[in-house]
Image (tube, grey):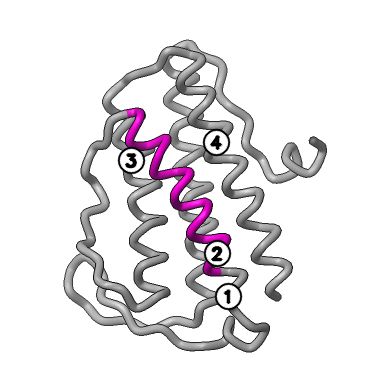
Amino acid sequence: MKKYFIDLFKYHGWANKKLIDGIKEGEINVECIMKILSHLLLSENTWLQRLKSEKYDNKFWTELTFEDCRELSEENKLNINTYLNSLSETDFNTVVKYTNSKGIEYSNTIGEILTHLSHHSSYHRGQIAKEMRRLGKEPVYTDYIVYLRK
């Protein structure tokens, strides 16, 4: 399971970088895209803090600058990779308690949270691709199969 998640989050880091590069190259500085991108990256950071039982603020919808997004994406990639490498095979079944943005306490395994994090980010990358197309720009293709073909 550890190798699976390490590989999955290598893809994840690639997809975020490719998306950010595509936004930069397309000279797209549209509020709705930046809001979604900021949310995607802030959520990654918050979920990692939850996994590590660190303090977090649940501020998922703060709009960051493009440079802040680029920096946070790289920081998230490094921190997620470091976190995953620190885990043993059995750690993925460890239950983590956390509080959502409405103050409700939940608990899930590390493996479940990592799976959610991956799907959540893919969902929002898809939203950004749709917005890019709506603006007449070529969307960035961040499908997993495209990553595997590189």
Q: Residue 121, image x and y in percent?
A: 48, 50
> Do the residues bearing badges 4 and 2 touch, measured as CB atoms within 8 Å?
no
Name the mark on residue 25: none
Whether residue 75 is in magenta: the answer is: yes
State the residue position of label 1: 86
State the residue position of label 3: 38
Q: Is residue 69 above or below residue 46?
A: above
State the residue position of label 2: 82
Q: Disc 4 marks which amino acid?
A: Lys
Q: CA–CA distance between discs 3 and 1?
A: 27 Å
Q: Quadrant of the C terminus?
A: top right
For residue 61, side relative to residue 79 (left or right): left
- Residue range in magenta is 66-83
Q: Secondary structure at mark 4?
A: helix
Q: Secondary structure at mark 2?
A: helix
* SS assignment for the magenta stretch, majority: helix
* N-terminal-most mark, 1 or 4: 4
